[in-house]
Amino acid sequence: MSFKSKLMAATAAAILVSTSAFAADTIMVHDPYVRSSTAKSTSGAAFMVLKNTGTVDDRLIGARASIAKKVELHTHMENSDGVMHMMEIEGGIPIAAGDQHMMVRGGDHVMFMGLSEALIQGDVISLTLTFEKAGDVSVEVPVDHARKPADQGNKMQHGTDG
Ligand SMILES: [Cu+2]
């Protein structure tokens, strides 16, 4: 990344923080990206690191985006046959004060169901995360189908539609 684009990214981040008032003061979203499993996929998933930099425990309780009919918080669970499948997370995702939560492929993710438009490589989508204490936090999420999970020990790929 060039110095100029770094500067632009920093400026964009500063604007994001200043316009979302108190919300972004405690919750930091790092390295978000979204991908669909195939070009014709009607669903997609977003991954990121959520950091609670505040002094109060918080909880991610929901998400919404204009590009999808439905946005859910999902995780992967192994069923009794040893097959991984996705399911909605009941009761949200707790993030203790000073702690962080990784949303990674094969683990927890933000699920977009019923996409109204294709997720095109290089596009940026707007996602709103709702926290119990911090309220709404807006995140600009780049579409990146090429991104590899940082954790190479995780061989799980995100499933197809659903
Ligand atoms: Cu999912």
Image: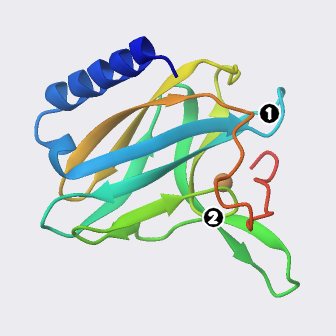
Tell me if 77 is positioned left or right of 66 in this view.
right
The amino acid beneath tag 1 is Ser
Residue at (22, 26) in percent of width and height: 14
Checking the image for residue 41, the label placed there is 1
Badge 1 element: loop
Mark 2 Cα shell of 10 Å, populated few (<14), some (14-19), many (≥20): some
Checking the image for residue 86, the label placed there is none
Residue at (50, 40) in percent of width and height: 32
Badge 2 element: loop
Q: Would you say the residues marked 2 and 1 are in contact, meaning their CB atoms lie under 8 Å apart?
A: no
Q: Mark 2, mark 1: which one is toward the viewer?
A: 2
Query: Which image quarter: residue 161?
Result: top right
x and y percentages locating residue 55 in the rendered image: 12, 66
CA distance separating discs 2 and 1: 20 Å
Query: Which image quarter: residue 138?
Result: top left
Q: Is residue 38 above or below residue 8?
A: below
Query: Which image quarter: residue 93?
Result: bottom left
Q: Is residue 4 above or below residue 61?
A: above
| Residue closest to the far bottom | 80
Residue highlighted by disc 2? 107
Tell me if 67 is positioned left or right of 135 in this view.
right
